Amino acid sequence: MRMHRSTLWLVSITSSLVLLSLIVAQVDWRVASSLVFSIDYCWVASGIALLILEGLITAARFRLLARTATSYGDCLRATACYVVMLILIPARLGEVAGVGFIVRYMHERAGAAAASLLFQRVFDVIILVTVLAAVCFLTFGGLGTLPVLGSTVVVTTLLILLLIRLEALLAVVVRPVLHRRQEKWPRMFIRTALQVRMVCRHHINWRRGLKLSGYTVLKWIVNLSAIACIVLAVAPVLTPLTAVGIGIVYNLAAVIPIQTVGGFGISEAALLGSFSWMGFPLETGAPMAIGIRLALISAPILFWLGVTLTIMISRP
């Protein structure tokens, strides 16, 4: 296990350094210098404030799925530590750290904590993919706004209703691999699926599922609005819809199977690729991508500092 983690760290650091060096090599420092003075910092501050609000919503979602009686303050501590770890360590270890913080501060069992995070991730992917499809149809499909938004709401609702009935769905998915349960990866898949099924059976009802859906939709509205604010602060020539699309691409870059430390390298590459695809030259897009990324990673750090200081001040 120690060797595996050491290898993961080595691969992640190497990947981040290689990707960052390729992006920094594209920077025209005269363009970067002029960009610093052209940014609308009020929009940047608004975006960071919205990302901090997203942290509060995430803590509420943690509390909703908690199987133990826990305070909102404990959920805030777990959330703050979790989100800051996601930008400090490799992604896979960040999720493991998230489970550890839920166990430590919210007094959950490790299996329930892992199932909770997995359940939230599935809801996140549903919302992101459907919103991405809506943005693509609005941008390239030539369809009206109301038909696209209406279809998006219907599809999202159906997917969420299906997910609320995940217990029955998991039974169908797991059954074909039961005969391979002695193998490593099928065994891990079956164990995780059973943990999620147990959470669904004993903890997720229609009311809680709908609340989770509402929190998730609100979380992503806030998240994408925040990223759009920061993108428009750096590139005001873009439309708000395009800025939202960049936010979706930025978030989906996290699932690209390239191990990096805290997403450094791959996130900047996703932003640079978006700007390049929209016609910005590389020497302009590179400093824009780096500037946006710096603003985005400052939010979880400020959120963690705020939660930590609040807890320290409130102690008798």
Image (tube, rainbow, N blue to C red):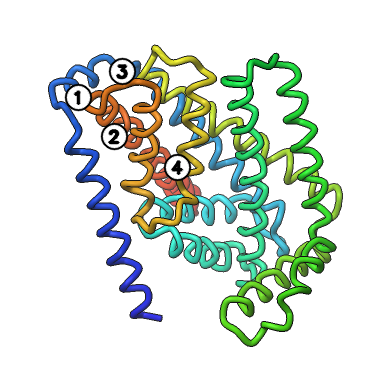
Pointer 2 or 1: first along the chain: 1
Q: Identify the residue position indicated by label 4 in the image.
A: 303
Please, is residue 171 above or below residue 44 in the view? below
Q: Position of residue 262 (x, y in %)?
A: 37, 52
Q: Which residue is mark 2?
A: 290
Q: Position of residue 178 (x, y in %)?
A: 73, 80
Evaluate if marks 4 and 2 touch, with contact meaning CB atoms under 8 Å apart. no
In the rendered image, residue 83, in percent from the top left (x then y), is placed at: 47, 50
Q: Is residue 3 above or below residue 289?
A: below
Q: Earlier in the sequence, mark 4 or mark 1?
A: 1
Mark in front: 3 vs 2 = 2
Residue type (three-letter) at the residue carrying disc 4: Phe
Q: Amino acid at mark 3?
A: Ile
**Dot 3 alpha-carbon crowd within 10 angstroms: few under 14, some 14 to 19, many 20 or more:** some
Per the model, the C-alpha gap separating discs 1 and 3 is 11 Å
Residue 286, picture quadrant: top left
Q: Residue furthest front?
A: 141
Give the mark toward the camera: 1 or 3: 1
Pick the residue in front: 203 or 228.
Answer: 228
Asked if the residue under mark 4 is in contact with the one under mark 3, i.e. CB atoms within 8 Å, the reply is no
Judging by the rendered image, the residue that carries numbered circle 3 is 39
Distance, label 3 to label 4, CA atoms, is 23 Å
Please give the label number shown on residue 32.
1
Residue at the image position 39 percent from the left and 38 percent from the top? 270
